Structure formats: C-alpha cells, structure tokens
Image (cartoon, rainbow, N blue to C red):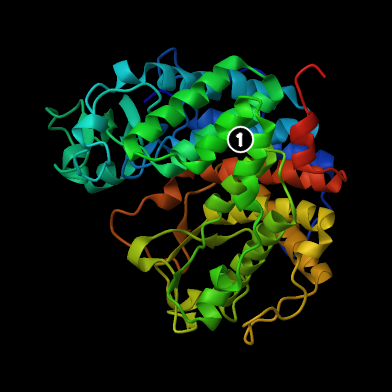
Amino acid sequence: MPPMAPGPGSITRTMGLGKAQPAVTAAPAWTPEELEGFAGELSDALVKTHLRRDASAFKGMLYEYAMPATGQQGYGRAWDGLRNGAWLGSAAILAYRANRGKVYLDLARQWILPFYLRVLAGSDKLFPLRDKAFSDGTPIPPDRAGPARGFVPLWWDDGTGVSFDALAERRTLDELLGPDQGYTNLLRLRSARDGKVAGYSHGTSEGITDTLALFLANTWLVTRDPQLAGGVRLLRACRKKELAGDPPLLALAEAVVSGDSAKATALAAPLNRAPSTPDTPLYRAVVARQRVELPVSLEPLLRGYLAAAAANSVGPGLARRLSLYTWETLALADRWYGAAKRQEGLMPAYQGALSPRWEAGRPRSLAGSSPQTLVGPRAGAEALLACALSLQLLTAFPEAWPEGRTPRTAERQVPPRAAAIARLKRELDKGLLYWRERLKRDGFLPADWPVGGRKPSPSYWGDQTSAAGAYVFLLAACAEYQVFLSGKRDWELAATTWVGK
C-alpha cells in the first residue's frame, strides 16, 4: 500500500521524532504556549495517520485505528467506528474556543463536518437496506425499518479500511461478525482473508448519535451555520422513529441550534443534579462492594459537559459530578496498581473478560499479577480531559466539592478541595508529559499493550497500531488545560466565541 499522503496544508507541520526518552520523573511547568505546541503535534499526527483524505464520499472520515508500519487504516471488529470522528470535531471546537486557532476551526469545517453532513442528508440513498437496524441481529419493527435520512451507521467503508481483528485472525468479515449481525457486506463473495471492510452497519449507537449531535450544537454556537441545525434535526427525527422515544441529549442539541435558550436550559437541568453517594464509582466498588469494571468510562460525563456548555447551563451540580467521578476514577486505577506506581495518564484498556474488576471491595487481581491485561492511552486521555475541566469547575464553584466524609462513606475519605485540585493538576502535568514523550519516542500513540508483557492472544495487534481516540482526547485535554492556565472557563467561551467577533 502506498505511503499516506500529507494532511491538509494548514494542519500539517513537520514533526521531529526524537530518540527514546527517559522515564518521566518530574512534572513539567506547562505553559499555554507549550500546550498549544503539543496540541499541534497531536493534530498533525492524527490527520496524517487516521483521517481519510481522498476525493470520495468518505473524505473527512476518521479511522479508529491505523498501523504505521503498513499504512493500513481501519477498525477492530468494525464496531462504533464513526464515534471518534464526532469526538474529533468536538475536540477541534474546544481547541478553537481555547485559543481562536483557525487551524482547528478549519479542521472541523473543512473535513469533519462535510463528512457527517453528507451522511445525514444522504443516508436514505447510502444505506438502503436496514432490516436489522439494532445491529445485534434483532430485526427492527417494520414501521421503523427501511432507509431514512438522518441515519449514521456504526461503521461504513468501501474496502479501503480493514478490520485488524479479521486480518490478524485470517478471517473474512462475514466469519468475524457472524451471519446474524445487522450489516450489509459488499465483499460477501470475496474469499480472500485480507481483512477488508466494505459495507455498512444497519444500526447506530447512543454514543455516536449523542456525540455527533453535541458536536453539531457546539459548532453551531461558533458559526450559526443553518446546515448544522438541519443536521441535528435530521438526526433527532431519525432516532425518535427508530427508538420510539426522544433521546434527551438530541432534544437539547436541537433546542440549542433552534436558538431556544429557555428550552435548552430546562433540558440541561438533569445534568446539574449533584450525584448521590451510591452512584459514585469508589463508593460502589469499596463501600457497597459491588462488581465494578475498570476503567470507569468518562465519555458519558464528558458528553454531559458538552451538552451543558452548549446550553449555557453549567453549574455546581455538574461541577461536583464531573470532578468527583474523575477523582474517584483515578483513585480506583491507583489502587488497581497496588504497590506499583501508576504512570499518570495511563489507564486500563477495555478487554472484555480480562478487564480489571473490583469485587467484594477489592480488585479481582492487581496490575502486577495480570501480565496479559491491557493498558493504554484512551481511558487515560479521557481522564486528562476530565481533569482539565474539573480544575475549571472547582475554581468556579468551590462549594461543589464535598469536603471530608460524605454520608455513608465510612470507608472513603474525600480529600480537601485544595488536595483534590493538586491531585488533578499532577495527573495532567505528568500525564501529558508522558504522552508527549511517547509520541516522540515511538512516532505514534499505540492502542494498548500488555501491562506485564504477555500477549493476551496469539492474534493480538494493539501495540502495533495507532489509536485515534488517544490523540482526540489528549488534544481536547491540552485545550482545556490552556483555558485553565489562562484563567478562563470553557463554558463561558462557548457563549461568547463566534467566528469574526
């Protein structure tokens, strides 16, 4: 396969890849300018490695994985592949709000937005067969089946991308996904086990639709482009028909793009409710002794923040929820490492049955005793973004942090607010430095790797591939840390930052 072409002109810079770097031993004193420099390196690498840039209907699509050694781009098992592109769009808008960098606005408007708007407007023609639209083999009721505008599939490709699982296991797409999956495979007659993916999923996901709607809504705040409002309305109408219900974040996004601030504020009210103690991850794992899987995904919380920011409705309830969940997620990850010190910015990767779990008040096994368990940047990068937002929130709403012991937490001591802020800042300082050095050393950010060096299976490929989500959330974390160090607040910038103002 020929080498990947350079990215769009204003995005592509020259990256000097250094030699192997020593282990991180001290936190750097990051400045906004240094953060902007690292953000530029991340966006360059992401565009060069993961973004589809040919003159086709797929121009602007972000591949979930890429293998630098071969130039191949693609998916794991061809699942939820279009979610990361919507997150990249949101990260670009956050970066634009942080520093008015036109390069990030161009990335969103010239590449990411046109792709998703083409899909939303033309999905009835692009995806005509959707008889199993729940993607798990369950037929959709006839009155909700069939082609529709406003649909975004879990994955879609023309044979350019590959499934790295299928490639590693020498299986066809049909063999990998099975005959009952809801998808149309345009390579059905191929016998070669080359991993190629061509076709589309019959269903979508809450993660894709909510993330895309919030990307469109936050971009509308910057541009007031009516195309974005139209895209949100198509997306919401399609999901309402499919689900026979109204997804709340899509309703909020439509209120935002319709200019109905009162309705948007009302719909954002649930996002500002402070969490009840039994809902927090550390309480469930340590006090209630429930079975809790690590990592604790922060994507739903981050989507909640994007929604509240778009609705101009960020308050102390959201501040407490996001900051407490973030701090507790770090605490659980630290405990999983046991006596070994966890590298800031590094978290367990989702691995199904092998994912770290908390059972009966303690980890099922510690990191050091699970050499085949995977760690990686995706969850850690999500946590770094949450740290940067939490620092802004705790500064704006100091009353949001629960000092000392909270009800029914005899086994959990919540630190003073100053200590929590110091902990979040340390995670950001050292975590961002770690990933900057990894990018210099390796030339890409790997999807994951075994914590103890033992491959989880003979067909394991994660340590050889670049993971788009890592770059996306690190880019957003750099932007939000810039905002914090500059003494600003992202949600206030969301309400005042327009193109040309």
Which quadrant does the C terminus fall into?
top right
Q: Amino acid at mark 1?
A: Ser
Q: Is residue 113 visible?
A: yes
Left or right placement of residue 306 versus residue 448 in this view: right
Which of the 4 image quarters holds residue 308? Answer: top right
Badge 1, how many Cα within 10 Å: few under 14, some, many 20+? many
Which of the 4 image quarters holds residue 258? Answer: top right
Q: Which residue is mark 1?
A: 90
Left or right placement of residue 301 versus residue 197 in this view: right
Q: Is residue 41 visible?
A: no
- Residue 352: where, in percent of width, then height? 35, 61
Above or below, 175 against 330 in this view is above
The residue depicted at 58 percent of the width and 56 percent of the height is 380
- Residue 54: where, in percent of width, then height? 45, 16
The residue depicted at 50 percent of the width and 48 percent of the height is 446
Tag count: 1
Above or below, 94 against 440 in this view is above
